[in-house]
Structures are given as structure tokens and as C-alpha cells.
Amino acid sequence: MIVVDTLLLVPRNIGLAILMLYRRLISPLYGDVCRYYPSCSAYTLGSIQQRGLLLGSLRGAIRILRCNPWAAGGIDDVPPKKHFRYTTTTRGFVVASTQRKG
């Protein structure tokens, strides 16, 4: 069961790694331009962690479309998933719940 969960989480964690690289290397070049808190990239990161690569990316894309000069902005947290069966590590990756954090 843990092996299957781990294999299913590979695409999600690859997407998270790409987004983390973007946040570390490219995002600082733009500065603080997002009208919402957390930023659009942080929102997408949390959304992918909770909902998976496809649905999380879709939610992130919708958020980016809402983040425009005419938007009021404000606090817009990722809605928590009611039954999240995985664990998020301190580095932001998602692992099966029975694995160690680290």
C-alpha cells in the first residue's frame, strides 16, 4: 500500500519541485506584485500539495487569472481538503502518512 501511494505521489512531487525552483529562482525577480496573500505561486504550491498535480494546477491557474490590476486582492488561503490522507514534509513534498517527515 505504501509503495502504491508513493508511486502515485511522484507526479505531484515533481510538480512541486518545479514550482519550488520557480519560487526560488524566478519569482524574486518580479518582486511583490501579487494582489492576494499568499502569493499566487504559494497558493498554487499549497493547492498542489492538497489536491494533486492536475486539480491543484487548475486551481492555481484560476487564481492567477483572478490576480489582475482590477482585482481587490486580499487574503485568499487554499481551502483545506477535509480528508487529506498524506503528510507534507518540512521541505514541502507530499509523502504517504506512515513515512517519516524530513
Image: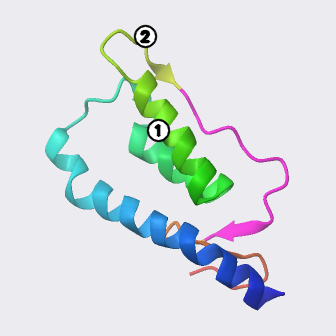
Residue 2's x, y, as percent? 78, 87
Residue 48's x, y, as percent? 57, 55
Q: Residue at x 49, y 46 (%)?
A: 44
Question: What amino acid is found at the position of numbered circle 2 in the picture?
Answer: Ala
Q: Where is the N terminus found, in terms of image quarters?
A: bottom right
Side of 96 relative to 55 (left or right): right
Q: Residue at x 31, y 55 (%)?
A: 23
Task: Specify the label residue 9 is tagged with.
Answer: none
Residue 73 painted magenta: no
Residue 35's x, y, as percent? 36, 23
Would residue 90 be seen by someone viewing this image from the given angle? no
Please say if 92 is above or below 40.
Answer: below
Number of other residues with Cα within 10 Å of mark 2, as a class: few under 14, some 14 to 19, many 20 or more: few
Mark 2–mark 1 Cα distance, whole angstroms, equals 18 Å
Q: Secondary structure at mark 1?
A: helix
Res 32 quadrant in image = top left
Q: Where is the C terminus found, in terms of image quarters?
A: bottom right
Q: Earlier in the sequence, mark 2 or mark 1?
A: 1
Q: Is the C-beta separation of discs 2 and 1 under 8 Å?
A: no
* Farthest bottom residue in view: 3
Q: Residue at x 20, y 48 (%)?
A: 28
Colouring mode (rainbow / by chain / secondary structure / one colour): rainbow
Q: Which secondary structure type mostly characterizes the magenta part of the structure? A: loop
Q: Circle 2 is placed at which residue position?
A: 72
Res 95 quadrant in image = bottom right
Please say if 97 is above or below 76.
Answer: below
**Is label 2 or label 1 in front?**
1
Residue 68's x, y, as percent? 34, 19
Would residue 48 be seen by someone viewing this image from the given angle? yes
Q: Circle 1 is placed at which residue position?
A: 61
Find the magenta span and give its range.
76-88
Question: What amino acid is found at the position of numbered circle 1 in the picture?
Answer: Ala
